[in-house]
Image (cartoon, grey):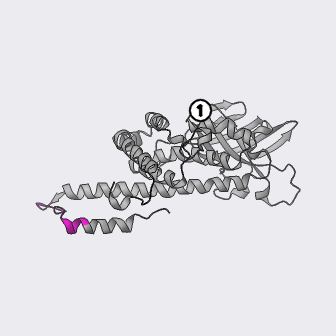
Amino acid sequence: MARLAQTAGLTDIQQEILSTVRDFVDKEIVPVATELEHRDEYPQQIVDGLKELGLFGLMIPEEYGGLGESLLTYALCVEEIARGWMSVSGIINTHFIVAYMLKQHGTQEQKDHYLPRMAAGDIRGAFSMSEPGLGSDVSAITSKAVKDGEEYVLNGQKMWLTNGGTSSLVAVLVRSDEGHPEGTAPHKSMTTFLIEKEPGFGEVRPGLTIPGKIDKMGYKGVDTTELIMDGLRLSPDSVLGGATGRGFYQMMDGVEVGRVNVAARGCGVAQRAFELGVRYAQQRHTFGKPISPPLGRHSVLRLAALKQTLWLPLF
């Protein structure tokens, strides 16, 4: 790693984690990324490797089998992964959002039930706010949960689920008017439900369908899907935190972790573009001359100065 892309003050453990991730990226992701991107193929072998590294438990507390690392460590790992192939950083993003929401807002029973298996990578998470007709206007969602006896019945259509097919746990935001009088602000009558399902497409559990992958212009390899609930019945234990009406705040809290991921992947992509640009400039000849002369001390300093302007630390 170039000196200016390093973060000062990291612990020995953080440096060891980053070194391990960097080696994995160079050996397992960089050589196959272009081929997988063109085929729009889910990188199962890469995901299995991340699972072996324990990366799915990076920020999950040690008491639940995770590494208990910081958001900074997570951001730096995402930067390394995106340097190899940005789509892989999306595969871990929603998993960490759901794990973070459970850690911050889940009941003790929910934490004990889900977090150890999420840390091991045996359960992988997705989360769902958006719907076909509302874009980023989260307060306008129409998917709804209605209490029926001891259970909730969910109906509605959700959109743009990253990892919608490959995940086995989805945090879904729906409207729930239970206990909220008419006139309550829309964002105060929403609830997050934790939905366990089988990975794959079609009807993945009674009342829940994942129709298939949505074709995209970019962001290949990671599956993006719809989610259709038609009479999906869930127990009260599925309500994140055990109480309705808190879903909007829980989701917004989780999205903040996702935004760190997106910022870090941008840094990783820029890092790789810089590396490839320098390599190409050193090899390319035109009009009988190389477009970049051999790098002397002053050339290296100029490149370092340029890189410093391009690379912005996250924290």
Q: Furthest residue to the left?
A: 288
Percent position (x, y) of residue 227? Answer: 65, 41
Q: Which of 232 and 195 is in front in this view?
A: 195
- Residue bounds of the magenta highlight: 286-300
Q: Is residue 20 above or below residue 304?
A: above
Using residue 17 as the reference point, say whether residue 242 is left or right of it: right
Q: Which of 186 and 107 is in front in this view?
A: 107
Q: Does the magenta stretch include residue 172?
A: no
Q: Quadrant of the N terminus?
A: bottom left
Q: Which of 309 and 286 is in front in this view?
A: 309
Using residue 53 as the reference point, say whether residue 120 is left or right of it: right
Q: Furthest residue to the front?
A: 12
Numbered-mark total: 1
Using residue 114 as the reference point, say whether residue 230 is left or right of it: right
Percent position (x, y) of residue 261? Answer: 52, 53
Percent position (x, y) of residue 306? Answer: 32, 68
Looking at the picture, which amino acid does disc 1 mark?
A: Pro
Name the quadrant containing residue 311.
bottom left
Residue name at image x 37 percent, y 69 percent: 309
Let me know if residue 113 appears in the view. yes
Characterize the local packing of mark 1: few (<14), some (14-19) or many (20 or more) Cα atoms within 10 angstroms: some
Let me know if residue 223 appears in the view. no
- Name the secondary structure under disc 1: loop
**Which residue has dot 1 on it?**
199
Residue name at image x 24 percent, y 64 percent: 300
Name the quadrant containing residue 231.
top right
Residue name at image x 56 percent, y 35 percent: 120
